[in-house]
Image: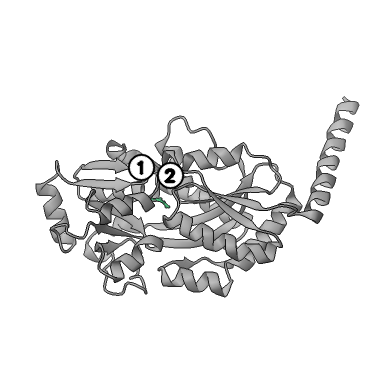
Amino acid sequence: MKNAVRMLLASAVGAALFGTAAAQTYPAKPVTMIIPFAAGGPTDIVGRQLAQAMTKPIGGTVIVENKPGAGGTLASEFVKTAAPDGYTILLHHIGMSTAPALYRNLRFNPLTDFEYIGQVVDVPMTLVARPDFPANNMKELVAYIKANKTKVNLANAGLGAASHLCGLLFQSAIQTEIQTIPYKGTGPAMTDLQGKQVDILCDQTTQTTQLIQTNRIKAYGATSSKRISSLPNLPTMAEQGYPQFDVAVWHGVYAPKGTPKPVLDKLNAALRQAVKDPGFTSSMDKLGTLPVADSAVTPEGLRSHLKAEIDKWTPIIKKAGQYAD
Ligand code: ASP
């Protein structure tokens, strides 16, 4: 018994020493930030800007790798099983909190399989349609969908994506089920929307702001509680009678469970500097995003928000379950 305790202590001390030694030279090679959706889409846009902003404070390159599929859950699973050495990290969004309710056999537990580095930025969503869609405002949109429910389709980035959640809330609010078309990200979904191959999409402002500003797509409402400063003419969903549409796509940075604490501390310090980086904040501001409080850019700030969001979305998703793909 005594020997077992001694061995356990020795291995804990060994791991801590290893962590300290590793942190001294960390990063000795590029850090890979895994993005759970397709290149060119909203999460990719946040991820690339963030990776660039983290590069200087971390003292090494942060590169981005897209691992899309299964509404973002493939990337989480990949990072769960990656080496816990600080060289593989995950940028994910609200989907980390909706996946447990959506997937019966999820192969990771968001609350126990990761280390938490901190939150990044909040991104509102917008309900948009192809440029030639007949409806010109929310009222017309709802009337058109109800009259043409077998013809209209709604693109999303798969079960667990923010666009899926938003579409679920929309169908539930208007009590009409429409056909959904899943993509590996809203990047490719937006290409098809602009190409008039799909009808409507609920997508983050990081991708839609400039397209709405230049009238390349139609927009019906924003999912934020206040109007988005870069899109002042776009009414909120709540203003139009749909208060259940208060969806902020929050983002977090995660590492595999067991990543040494000194390495996590370095990642957190780099993240805290990156979210205040003037280049990062100005490009994010232009895309309608909202900064998060300093207390959110911490391991506990991310973990407690994740837990609160799982508790918030689980009953809502279960209730709207009939609309899940
Ligand atoms: N954020 C995703 C993307 O980058 C899509 C989504 O969550 O709806 O494609």
Nearer to the camera, 269 or 24: 24
| Quarter-of-image position of residue 10 | top right
Q: Nearer the viewer, residue 17 or 245?
A: 17
x 21%, y 45%: residue: 153
Q: CA distance from mark 2 to mark 1?
A: 8 Å
Q: Characterize the local packing of mark 1: few (<14), some (14-19) or many (20 or more) Cα atoms within 10 angstroms.
A: many
Is label 2 in a helix, a strand or a loop?
helix
Which residue is found at the position 81% from the left and 41% from the top? 15
Spot occupied by residue 125 in the image (x, y as percentages of width and height): 35, 59
Residue annotated with mark 2: 98
> In the rendered image, which quarter is residue 151 located in?
top left
Q: Is residue 168 visible?
A: no
Q: Which residue is mark 1?
A: 317
Label 1 amino acid?
Answer: Ile
Q: Quadrant of the C terminus?
A: top left
Three-letter amino acid code at the position of disc 2: Thr
